[in-house]
Amino acid sequence: MKTIPLAVDVEMATHNDIYQVWIDSMFDKERAEDDGLVITAFHQWLDHCGDARIKGYGINSGRKLWQVSREIQRQAFKICKQYSMTLNQKEKER
């Protein structure tokens, strides 16, 4: 099973282009394994990281991820999805 990491911050290069997305993959992996919060779809991902701050250049700087266009949100999601992590499968108890 895989989980998609959450965006912590999004840095913009222009009004509409993302330069980079900051993630905390170790925290996200531990959260998924310990709490069972596995992110597999865009709407789940946005629900949990919609408050990520937009930084950098452009008119969206200073806003939060939920406040920007769906196009920018999808760009950030695709970047995070590239870093999907495989979770350790817990052995079934007998």
Image (tube, rainbow, N blue to C red):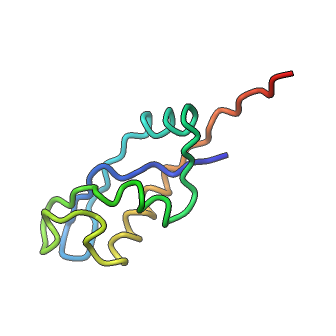
Asked if residue 63 lies left or right of residue 45, the reply is left
Classify the position of the C terminus by image quarter.
top right
* Percent position of residue 19, x then y: 26, 61
Residue at 28%, 66% in the rendered image: 18
The residue closer to the viewer here, 31 or 23, is 31
Residue at 31%, 49% in the rendered image: 8
Seen in the picture, residue 5 relative to 11 is either above or below; the reply is above
The quadrant in which residue 60 appears is bottom left
Residue at 38%, 69% in the rendered image: 75
Spot the residue most to the right.
94
The residue closer to the viewer here, 21 or 7, is 7
Asked if residue 68 lies left or right of residue 94, the reply is left
* Percent position of residue 10, x then y: 26, 58
Give the number of callouts: 0
Asked if residue 38 lies left or right of residue 55, the reply is right
Seen in the picture, residue 23 relative to 27 is either above or below; the reply is below
* Percent position of residue 49, x then y: 36, 55
Spot the residue most to the top.
94
Seen in the picture, residue 55 relative to 22 is either above or below; the reply is below
Asked if residue 47 lies left or right of residue 58, the reply is right
Residue at 58%, 40% in the rendered image: 36
